[in-house]
Amino acid sequence: MTGNHAMMTERRWSPFYQWENRSPPPAYRCRSSTNKFMTDELGDPPTRLLVALTKGDRAAAMDAIHAGDDVNARDPRPVIGDQTTALHLAALDGDHLLIRELILHGADVDAQCGTGQTPLWFACNGNYYEAIKELLASGADHTITNNDGYTPRDRVLASDPRTLAMIDDHVARHER
């Protein structure tokens, strides 16, 4: 790789919006001019909380949560919203502290978006270990399938042995 692309893939985007050591996950890469165009065409999500999260403004999201915004409101916009909730967006970013705050304020840990994915599915998709741990500890159901019939465990089966082991350990402890 050459130029700026090589530099981007050497660092990792963290939930607190600071560069670390890998390339940014697809969620951040799509927050580009295309997403801005779609937002211009479709408008903002219905709540301050969802607006803050889609713009990557964690502080504004926390303010909206504490001000009483509906933590289970869904973003009805096609394609870029797809019936996601604030918990889906926090899981997509791997922000385990925001996940905890949303759950403390009543967020549904098993809410499914338009494709049937839960916040746990989103966290597994990004291999966000701490976010996955937080969701499982809060009672997220690891057996819920998406519209294609896959569970979050299926998502990490071939890609992340550490997360797979954590899910399997959680299952084993709760089946006793």
Image (cartoon, rainbow, N blue to C red):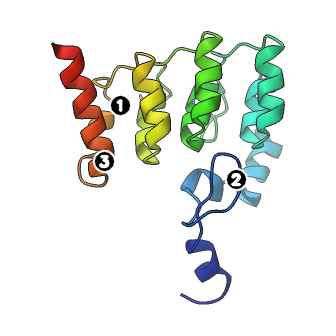
Where does the image place residue 97, in percent across and percent down from the top left?
Answer: 62, 31
Where does the image place residue 70, in percent across and percent down from the top left?
Answer: 72, 13
Viewport quadrant of the C terminus: top left
User: Going 79% across and 40% down the picture, which residue do you hit?
Assistant: 57
Q: Distance between the residues labelled 2 and 3?
A: 29 Å
Residue on which the image places disc 2: 31
Determine the secondary structure under disc 3.
helix
Mark toward the start of the polypeptide (1 vs 3) = 1
Q: Do the residues labelled 2 and 1 touch (CB within 8 Å)?
A: no
Mark toward the start of the polypeptide (2 vs 3) = 2
Mark toward the start of the polypeptide (2 vs 1) = 2
Q: In which quarter of the image is residue 81?
A: top right
Relative horizontal placement of residue 152, taking residue 54 as reference (left or right): left
Q: How far apart are marks 2 and 1 (CA)?
A: 24 Å
Relative horizontal placement of residue 28, taking residue 143 as reference (left or right): right
Residue on which the image places disc 1: 146
What amino acid is found at the position of numbered circle 1 in the picture?
Asn
Residue closest to the eye, 74 or 17: 17
What amino acid is found at the position of numbered circle 3 in the picture?
Arg
Q: Which numbered mark, 1 or 3, is in the foreground of this view? A: 3
Where does the image place residue 49, in percent across and percent down from the top left?
Answer: 76, 25
Determine the secondary structure under disc 1.
loop
Q: Is residue 168 placed above or below 93 in the rendered structure?
A: above
Relative horizontal placement of residue 124, taking residue 19 as reference (left or right): left
Q: Is residue 69 placed above or below 40 in the rendered structure?
A: above
